[in-house]
Image (cartoon, helix red, strand yellow):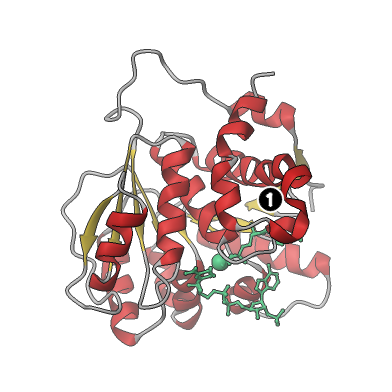
């Protein structure tokens, strides 16, 4: 097993792209976030706000009808498309020109939602980030993993990872099983935790930013929006995963002196993305 490559400032500066003076929102990329269900629309709101703050030009969300007003009011910059169903996603029908899609936050695992995910994956070839309930649905239906486009990014926390790859008996075993999973399925796995590892086949990266303030509801939903935004901005898959994870952690390092560990919430990640980007220029 290769030893992990540290994701530090040097690795980031090799990958980070500055913004062209003459760019416009059409060039900056269009991210789509699919998710939400009754009581968990906030996950999509966080993801979508994070996508915008990470720099894509346009963001659309696809949510059940109960998410319509919530999203229009909580994130007016976002465009909203709704499912036919009131409380959960039942059919992902969209005709949109987007550059990358993040799917899963707050989505739930109703049978109709599972079928909707299957049909969506059967027809999709755009770059994808799979998180939360979309991961759990894949764990229930492992044959559907073959429907993912090569280089799809999966962002499981350890419980979600265990559902995907089964139990491990040591940290080395966990990494070994994840490498095999990444190779067999041609996917990039962001193993969220403290620290977060990114597994791209035999190549393993370990993040150097972040702290325990991130142990708060919605911080993974924010990460999904950030990585989807970077993919929409035409970052290569592995660069989007690396830069997203690094910036996400950096927000917590920047905010910590003001918030302390306890009062930091997922919205503070979003509020500090700007400072995280600016710190790359110093
Ligand atoms: N505002 C909203 O709308 C929000 C909506 N959300 C949405 O809710 C849905 C369910 O997502 P979820 O992750 O809470 O549930 P689930 O996968 O069962 O994991 C729970 C169990 O897994 C473990 N565990 C968790 N994290 C771990 C870690 N880092 N490292 C290790 N273990 C970890 C832990 O298990 P334990 O350690 O207690 O055995 C815990 O009990 C999903 O759609 C999500 O997007 C949330 O994002 C919150 C904000
Ligand atoms: N103690 C910690 N140190 C560093 N990062 C952490 C810690 N706890 C959680 N995180 C990060 O916070 C995020 C949590 O994601 P997740 O569990 O999916 O949250 P949610 O589903 O509530 O949005 C991951 O990026 C994880 O790496
Ligand atoms: Mg999560």
The front one of 62 and 243 is 62
Q: Is residue 43 above or below residue 61?
A: below
Q: Residue at x 31, y 56 (%)?
A: 73
Q: Residue at x 44, y 80 (%)?
A: 141
Q: Quadrant of the C terminus?
A: top right
Q: Determine the secondary structure under disc 1.
A: loop
Q: How many marks?
A: 1
The residue that disc 1 covers is: 202
The front one of 208 and 235 is 208
- Residue 43 location in percent, x, y? 46, 64
Q: Could you say which quadrant of the image residue 33 lies in?
A: bottom left
How crowded pointer 1 is (Cα within 10 Å; few <14, some 14-19, many 20+) is rated as: some
Q: Could you say which quadrant of the image residue 120 lies in?
A: bottom left
Quadrant of the image where one finds ligand 3: bottom right
The answer to whether mark 1 is within 8 Å of ligand 2 is no
- Residue 197 location in percent, x, y? 71, 53
Q: Residue at x 35, y 78 (%)?
A: 38
- Residue 142 location in percent, x, y? 47, 77
Q: Is residue 7 left or right of residue 149?
A: right
Q: Is residue 166 left or right of residue 68?
A: right
Q: Is residue 248 above or below residue 14?
A: below
Q: Is residue 257 above or below residue 213?
A: above
């Amino acid at each position: 097993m290769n030893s992990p490559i540290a994701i530090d400032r040097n690795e980031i500066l090799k990958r980070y792209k500055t913004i062209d003076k003459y760019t416009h929102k059409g060039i900056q990329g269009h991210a789509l976030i699919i998710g939400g269900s009754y009581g968990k629309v906030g996950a999509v709101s966080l993801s979508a706000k994070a996508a915008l703050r990470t720099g894509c030009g346009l963001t659309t969300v696809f949510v059940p009808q109960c998410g319509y007003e919530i999203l229009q009011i909580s994130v007016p910059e976002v465009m909203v498309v709704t499912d036919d169903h009131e409380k959960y996603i039942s059919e992902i029908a969209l005709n949109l020109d987007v550059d990358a899609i993040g799917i899963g936050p707050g989505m739930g695992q109703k049978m109709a939602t599972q079928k909707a995910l299957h049909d969506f994956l059967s027809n999709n070839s755009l770059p994808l980030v799979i998180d939360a309930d979309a991961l759990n649905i894949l764990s229930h239906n492992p044959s559907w993993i073959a429907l993912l486009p090569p280089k799809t990014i999966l962002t499981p926390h350890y419980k979600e990872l265990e559902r995907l790859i089964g139990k491990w008996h040591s940290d080395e075993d966990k990494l070994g099983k994840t490498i095999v999973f990444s190779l067999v399925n041609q996917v990039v796995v962001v193993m969220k935790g403290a620290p977060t590892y990114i597994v791209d086949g035999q190549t393993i990266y370990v993040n150097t930013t972040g702290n325990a303030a991130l142990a708060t509801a919605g911080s993974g939903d924010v990460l999904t929006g950030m990585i989807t935004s970077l993919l929409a901005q035409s970052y290569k898959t592995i660069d989007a995963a690396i830069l997203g994870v690094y910036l996400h952690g950096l927000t917590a390092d920047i905010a910590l002196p003001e918030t302390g560990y306890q009062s930091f919430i997922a919205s503070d990640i979003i509020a500090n993305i700007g400072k995280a980007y600016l710190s790359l220029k110093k």
